[in-house]
Image (cartoon, helix red, strand yellow):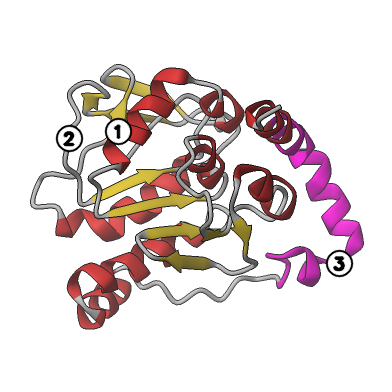
Amino acid sequence: MLLYPGMTALDVVGPQALLAGLSAGNLHLVAKVAGAVESDTGVSLLATISLAECPRDLDVLFVPGGDGTPAQMRDAQVIAFLRDRAERAAWIASVCTGSLILGAAGLLDGYRATSHWCVRDRVLPILGAEPVAERVVFDRNRVTAAGVSAGLDLGLALAARLCGSDYARTGQLVAEYAPRPPFRSGTPEEAGPEITRAARAILDRLAADSLTAALALRPR
């Protein structure tokens, strides 16, 4: 699981909580340098190993999203790491705008994929992906999830592929994942125009910077 400055902590922690039991102590939190990595809300996660120390052959290669996404899309070291490990990974996964980082590495070219709604339809096509408005999208060995909270869905869906539906259902019950949100405003369609405008004001910088990074990658 890749960590980087400006990631969204829940993008990592949700799937990690549901997948950690599969790893037998071999779930690695990876960053350029081992140690604390600050998220986009100020919470730090601890990278256990560096990119160079990460095992070459992976069952799952996972990338979170967050405000730091555009910088990672431009980071040659991160892109090279993803391309190398993806050559041998059984599954390549992302949550939220993490799919844009995969796309920047050329790993979603010709694949159906999703991302956060603020970038999904505009930025993913520039990176060669076919955008899909679903919580979790599987296409061959790629699995992408929509914004932030969809990481829990990805964790369960991927656990089912790895260990069967009963394992995943048990994990869901252990986590008591039975969401009943107090508001039905988790998508622009449900939230309505006024709330969507307020959300866009918060997300505009991320969306604009991600678009700029994607356009810079497009062949001239």
Q: Residues within 10 Å of mark 2 (few under 14, many from 20)?
A: some
Q: Residue reaching furthest left? A: 24
In-front residue for pair 153/162: 162
- Is residue 191 rendered magenta in the image? yes
* Residue on which the image places disc 3: 192
Does label 1 or label 2 sit earlier along the sequence?
A: 2
At horizontal 64% and vertical 49% (from top left) the residue drawn is: 124
Q: Residue reaching furthest bottom? A: 166
In-front residue for pair 198/86: 86
Magenta highlight: main SS: helix
* Residue on which the image places disc 1: 84
For residue 56, which numbered disc appears in the image? 2
Q: Are the residues flagged by discs 1 and 2 in contact, CB closer than 8 Å?
A: yes
Say if 211 sits above or below 92 in the image.
above
Say which quarter of the image contains residue 44: top left
Magenta extent: 184-209
- Distance, label 3 to label 2, CA atoms, is 46 Å
Question: Which marked residue is nearer to the observer: mark 3 or mark 1?
Answer: 1
Question: Which marked residue is nearer to the observer: mark 3 or mark 2?
Answer: 2
- Is residue 97 rendered magenta in the image? no
For residue 95, which numbered disc appears in the image? none
